[in-house]
Amino acid sequence: MTRAGLIALAVFIIATGLLFSLNPRTQQKLSAAVLQAVAPVFSTGSSVKTRVQAYTTGVKSLAELEDDNKRLKTENNELRVTNQMLRDLGDENVNLRRALTYKQRSNFKLIPCRVIARESATWWSQVQIDRGEQDGIESDMPVLTESGLVGKTTIVAQRTAYVLLVADENCKVAVSIEGTRDQGILSGTRLSTGAQPELLIRFLPKTVEAKPGQKVYSSGVSGGVFPSGLVLGTVAEEPRVRELDAQVRVSPAVDMSRLENLFVVVPHKEGG
Amino acid sequence: MPSFDVLHGARITLFPVLLAYGSLALPYPLVLTLAFCSGLLWDLLNLQVITSTATLLKTPSVEVFAGTSVVLYGLLGTLMHGLRPLFLRGRWEIHVLLSSLCTIAILLAEFLVLNLKRGGFDFPPVMWWRILAPGAIALLLAPVVYLGFTILANLLHYPVRENPREPRGLHRGI
């Protein structure tokens, strides 16, 4: 080996050693910087993909557009009515809580975002979104759709962020099953595949009485990431009782293969 | 690069193929530089930070440390650079095969680290798809990438097929 080669090898070993000595927070910051740098590439790729998909789905005829328009108008009216009813119920709830001198529930703000890259890693179930620190997003914030909980933010750059999906083994959510008092920890599998990943509730009591079709909600552990009451899915089959606990398979409420428009749940700051 | 649903979510992994060609075309210090940069970029783009909510401090931890791929790329780059004389003798298929093996080795190492961190070794069939399929794709891609870079090198008069330590005339037997 030449002298230059030996010097390069020594520098390489020292630089690699320094890398290993970086703490997780510094690595997170470095990762966010790289993510920010490559975000325009992902974003462009996503818009090209969207255009290609729009082209392949074909141009709709005037009659089809009219039908769509009618249907959407009807849906819009229905949603307005439902929205008004829910607002009334919300007001009533606040008044009742106040009357009972309950502590008011924390307010949350929903930040809409778009998925710009899907499955950007081999071993982790994650997506990349087009919102970041600039929009008030931080790591460990819940992400959802109108159908239910999707996951949580992990690495957040200026204008983009990664969302770890509930289908991943690392995304653990404290949950409760509808109609029961049983609580457990829901997570995905080590390697999830396809549109319907497998979700599993672990650490349930052996006496659990879950029935297929019952809904699964986040139970909102104190100091945790996810607030209570978010839908995660429905019980798919009868519980499997093991030596120390019971496990229940869950069908996810959200179709993970069709994630497009999401919402990041950001705590509403007082006076902000 | 995109993932393929048909191949159970396997992806195209270009970095090892580029590293393999770089180890043929560049002097050793630059091979190490390439290994460091590509390994670091790969690790940072795939960094997975887990925040534990079990403690009040909420300290984050990293699954696959940034630098893991740097070590692997460095070792494989060194090996491929060491086998460069074979390429100079026209045995290009060795490095094509090494590109594939490098891809497989890196993905397998990542999965093993991940298993060590999470506990419990689990080898579902989909894992083999996600490791072997990118290796097979690399095997198909490598000759195309090599050809493309060789044409580019010829256009730019960069001497890939010559040993930089020897005078240009010697290699040609003049």
Image (cartoon, helix red, strand yellow):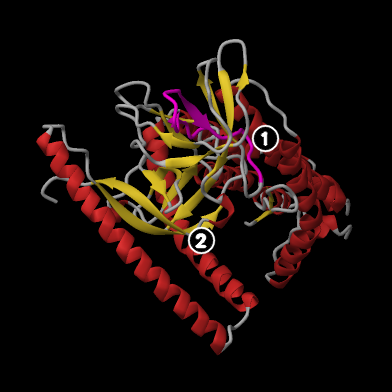
Q: Residue visible at 56% across and 57% down?
A: A258
Residue A25 visible to the viewer: yes
Q: Which chain is disc 1 placed on?
A: B
Q: Which residue is at 40% across, 27% downward?
A: B52
Furthest toward the bottom, the residue is A62
Q: Circle 1: is it few (<14), some (14-19), or many (20+) Cα within 10 Å?
A: some
Verify whether residue A171 appears in magenta. Answer: yes
Range shown magenta: A170-193
Nearest the eye: A157 or A71? A71
Judge left or right: residue B44 versus residue A212. left
Q: Chain of mark 2?
A: A
Q: Provide residue A173's location: percent of width, then percent of height.
A: 44, 32
The residue at which mark 1 appears reads as B75
Marking on residue B51: none
The residue singled out by tag 2 in the image is: A42
| SS class, disc 2 | helix
Query: SS for tag 1?
Result: helix
Residue B112: name its quadrant: top right
Q: Residue type at mark 2? A: Phe
| Residue in the picture at 30% in, 24% down | B57
Picture coordinates of residue B104, whole percent (x, y):
74, 40
Relative to residue A271, is residue A17 depicted above or below? above
Q: CA distance from mark 1 to mark 2?
A: 30 Å
Q: Quadrant of the N terminus of chain A?
A: top right
Name, please, the residue furthest toward the top. Answer: A243
